[in-house]
Image: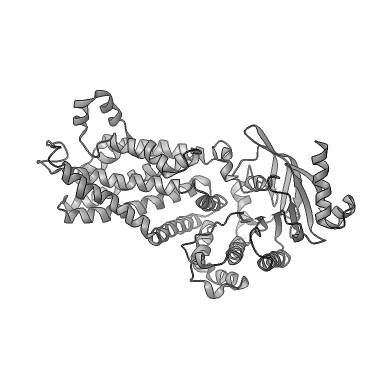
Amino acid sequence: MTLAQYGRCLRGILVREGLRFLHQRERFFGALVRPLVWLFIFAAGFRSVLGVSIIPPYETYILYEEYIVPGLAAMILLFSGMQSSLSMVYDREMGSMRLLMVSPFPRWYLLFCKLAAGALVAVVQVYLFLAIAWFWEVQPPPLGYLMVLPALLLAALMLGALGLFLSSVIRQLENFAGVMNFVIFPMFFASSALYPLWRIRDSSHALYEICRFNPFTWAVETIRFALYTQVSWTDLLGVAAALALFLAAALIGYDPGRGMMRFKQGGA
Amino acid sequence: MENPATAEQPGALALEIDGVSFDYPGRRVLEGVAFSVPAGGFCVLLGVNGAGKTTLFSLITRLFLCRTGAIRILGKDLGREGPGALAALGVVFQQSTLDLDLSLRQNLRYHCALHGLDPAEMAPRIDSALSRVGLADRARDKARQLSGGQRRRLELARALLHRPRLLLADEPTVGLDVHSRQAIIQQVRASCRDQGVGVLWATHLVDEVEPDDQVVVLHRGRVLSRGTAGELLRDTGGKTVHEAFSRLTSGTGAGE
């Protein structure tokens, strides 16, 4: 296999995921409505309940709406990563996974292409959301919209890799509701997406520690700082480390010899 | 072939299965399976549901790792030269693997990309593949709009698009009407003959067997018989393949 062939493979997978996304209007719509409901309704209701003090990267008092936008951006990536990876678990999609697996390219490369395609689609959704939030008067500095791009891509890859790993091991939990309850909700609520962590520390120190070591918190903070043209190196490194870990776990999961695929009789 | 990965080794069999066994946790599904498919040969893998056909296909397509025994495609060992071996392989899976929301042409272009082929250069080949299966005028339609038989024909065209030397088909005619079944079988036999593609055709429908075909009877994970259909009839004393198959498989059932 030459480099050009690797390139064609990546392009083909990107085009396919892009086309599928455009054709699935409900998925597209749903992905956008979810964070908007949080922004328009939840944030409006909680604005007066939750006061947010001045914490980095913010330099003045901010409205609650402004605080949760980075968290909601990360939420889009979280849902998208879980959805695109877990759709592989279903029988119909299992077929497309098998088609991918009989390609003569190395398996790690195929999984990476799939992951990259999913991440790009998710990042497009985030930008649409940020555009709508701009009209809702959540207006970070223009440079922030550029700086947030690598942060979003990295976070999207990390959450996609987590979904990919889950899709390789999950047998019983073969529906999205299960994943919602056991992965998405705990990760989302035990993070800095909806409230600054110092507020949680006031209630429970143990919970505070859990939130601090939640990769989703790192993703949210990386995005938050980037959106306000700063870099939070510790969070960024955390996201990168989590990406490496989840990716390695996903590769093992999809390895025909070691992985869990062989125990999945649904795939047999 | 210009691609070294698919370059044929002289005299290589299209497929060799050599002493393959496989277990699911606590359950043996394949036991010492051994047979081969010559280049350009048509081999029917005959077995009832649950005989182990799909597991064997999962091993040949590297979804599962073959730990006991060896599988070689054109002489390339799947364990050691996996990607090279897969380049020479075309597959029609039991379940449809088309993207129903994508057009016929988009589906085929995606397949080309997965094999590292340039979609632009492949355009004429895609067109001729579509017209060979009578779907040239549907190229822009979504795969969802095709009938069951048409989808199967498209999948077959797709599996042959990168000019593999071995075609695997896992019960591709299940659920189709007689007419579609005939069309697909004839199409595969023609490709097999014209392009020298070895075919491993898994089925439980005995009427798909022709006298000169290689037949491998798989039952409860074991190979009960292999040889041409004619030999199968002679050895079992059956008048039809159906009768021969029943005698073979009921024999082991009574012995247990």
Q: How many marks?
A: 0
In the shown orientation, is residue B15 left or right of residue A139? Answer: right
Q: Which residue sits furthest bottom?
A: B137
As drawn, B120 above or below A96: below
In the shown orientation, is residue A157 left or right of residue B122? Answer: left
Q: Which residue sits furthest top?
A: A205
Q: Nearer the viewer, residue B63 or B1?
A: B63
Q: Which residue sits furthest left?
A: A60
Taking the spot 36% from the left edge, 57% from the top edge, the residue there is A26
As drawn, A266 above or below B155: above
As drawn, B109 above or below B127: above
Q: Is residue B103 visible?
A: yes
Colour scheme used in the picture? one colour
- Rendering coords of residue B119 (x, y %): 50, 65
Taking the spot 17% from the left edge, 56% from the top edge, the residue there is A135
- Rendering coords of residue A143 (x, y %): 19, 51
Taking the spot 36% from the left edge, 53% from the top edge, the residue there is A120
- Rendering coords of residue A4 (x, y %): 48, 58
- Rendering coords of residue B24 (x, y %): 63, 36
Q: Nearer the viewer, residue B41 or B77?
A: B41
